Image (cartoon, rainbow, N blue to C red):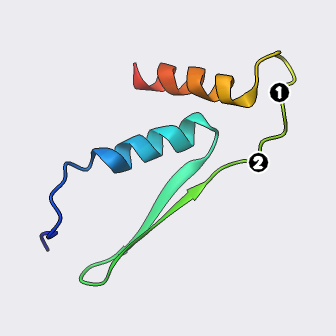
Amino acid sequence: MESPVPGTGLGLSLAKSFAEAMGGSLSVFSEPGKGSAFTIQLPAASGPHPESNEAPTQTVMKNLHSTMN
């Protein structure tokens, strides 16, 4: 079934990359003719990485950059 909303599918790919870069995952449940449900699971932030002085956001952005190259 063709969607009435045009798009390239890039958003889903980016969401998956962001989730994985943060140590999480993205999953989908789809039923033809009924729709799809997307779930993003992310670990809870607990402060700076124990082996680093970097804040969690800095670490995530580094990981994301390395997965996209």
Could you say which disc has been placed on residue 56 in the image?
none
Instruction: Name the residue rendered at 55%, 56% in the picture.
Output: 40
Quick check: 4 above or below 68? Answer: below
Residue 52 location, x and y as percent?
81, 16
Residues under labels 2 and 1: Cα distance? 12 Å
Quick check: 47 above or below 38? Answer: above
- Check disc 2 and give the amino acid type: Ala
What is the crowding at mark 1: few (fewer than 14 residues within 10 Å), some, or many (at least 20)? Answer: some
What is the crowding at mark 2: few (fewer than 14 residues within 10 Å), some, or many (at least 20)? Answer: few
Label 1: which residue?
A: 48
Mark 2 lies on a secondary structure that is: loop
Instruction: Name the residue rendered at 45%, 45% in the picture.
Output: 16
Instruction: Name the residue rendered at 73%, 30% in the picture.
Output: 56
Left or right: 36 in relation to 66:
left
Residue 55 location, x and y as percent?
76, 25
Q: In which quarter of the image is residue 30?
A: bottom left
Residue 32 location, x and y as percent?
26, 79
Q: In which quarter of the image is the N terminus?
A: bottom left
Mark 1 lies on a secondary structure that is: loop
Left or right: 9 in relation to 42:
left
Observer-nearest residue: 21 or 61? 61
Residue 47 location, x and y as percent?
84, 33
Q: In which quarter of the image is the C terminus?
A: top left
- Check disc 1 and give the amino acid type: Pro
Could you say which disc has been placed on residue 44 in the image?
2
Extreme residue toward the bottom, this view: 34
Quick check: 19 above or below 28? Answer: above
Q: How many labels does the image show?
A: 2
